[in-house]
Amino acid sequence: SRGDGGLVSREEVGRATWTFLHTLAAQYPDKPSRQQQQDARNLVDILTRMYPCGECARHFGEVVRAHPPQLASRAAFSLWMCEVHNTVNRRLDKPVFNCALVESRWAGIECEDEAEGGGSACSLD
Ligand code: FAD
């Protein structure tokens, strides 16, 4: 038992969420369909309302309104994610990350096995 009554810290949910978001961006298509772009826009928009830390969600909403998601390609979306994460980093007095390195820090999910009947188990396009 963790001895914390099941509570999760802001730091823990933050790290888990950034891992999810940067990994999602790393696997966003190079040439996204309109549906894929709308899905990414909706995901970000929902986070600005449902992220499980109210103050964080409100602040993230201001960040996203000032700097709307860049959805035209994997590179554009990965860079945008890095930039909004840096805006949060600055607010929390954390080091700013060099976004030229984002695609090596976050390269997508480990994927050894291929799905049955062709197609990768991990990539989206
Ligand atoms: P994290 O910031 O969680 O980063 C995890 C790892 O990502 C780092 O170790 C580094 O390897 C890498 N990384 C760092 N910066 C970047 C970048 N720019 N691009 C790519 N990779 C990077 N906490 C609050 O206290 N107040 C808030 O208002 C708040 N708002 C948040 C809003 C959102 C949408 C999210 C997802 C989190 C928010 N958090 C907030 C949590 C906060 O951002 C951190 O996740 C938490 O403080 C833990 O920080 P950390 O030092 O472990 O690294």
Image: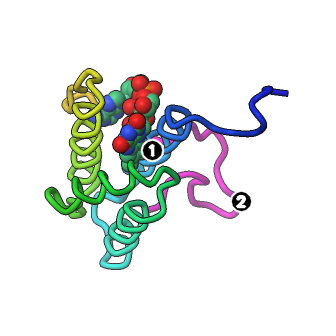
Neighbours of disc 1 within 10 Å: few (<14), some (14-19), many (20+): some
Q: Residue at x 38, y 71 (%)?
A: 42
Query: Residue 17 in the image: x percent, y percent?
Result: 49, 44
Nearer to the camera, 111 or 117: 111
In this figure, which residue is indicated by the disc labeled 2? 116
Most extreme residue toward the left is 66
Ligand 1, image quadrant it occupies: top left
The stretch of residues the image draws in magenta is 108-125
Q: Magenta segment: does it hold 31?
A: no
Q: Which mark is residue 104?
A: none
At numbered mark 1, what does the secondary structure look like: helix, strand or loop?
Answer: helix
Tell me the residue at 19%/30% (across/down).
100
Location of residue 57 (image quadrant): bottom left
Residue 107 picture location, percent across and down: 41, 36
Seen at 55% across and 33% down, the residue is 12
Which secondary structure class fits the magenta region best? loop
Image location (x, y in percent) of residue 40: 37, 65
Identity of the residue drawn at 39% across and 48% down: 56
Mark 2 vs mark 1, CA separation in Å: 23 Å
Amino acid tagged 1: Thr
| Residue 88 location, quadrant | top left
Residue 106 in view of the camera? no
Nearer to us in this view, 53 or 31: 53
On screen, residue 46 versus residue 58, left or right, reads right
Residue furthest to the right in view is 1
User: Disc 1 designates what residue?
Assistant: 23
On the rendered structure, is 46 left or right of 96?
Answer: right
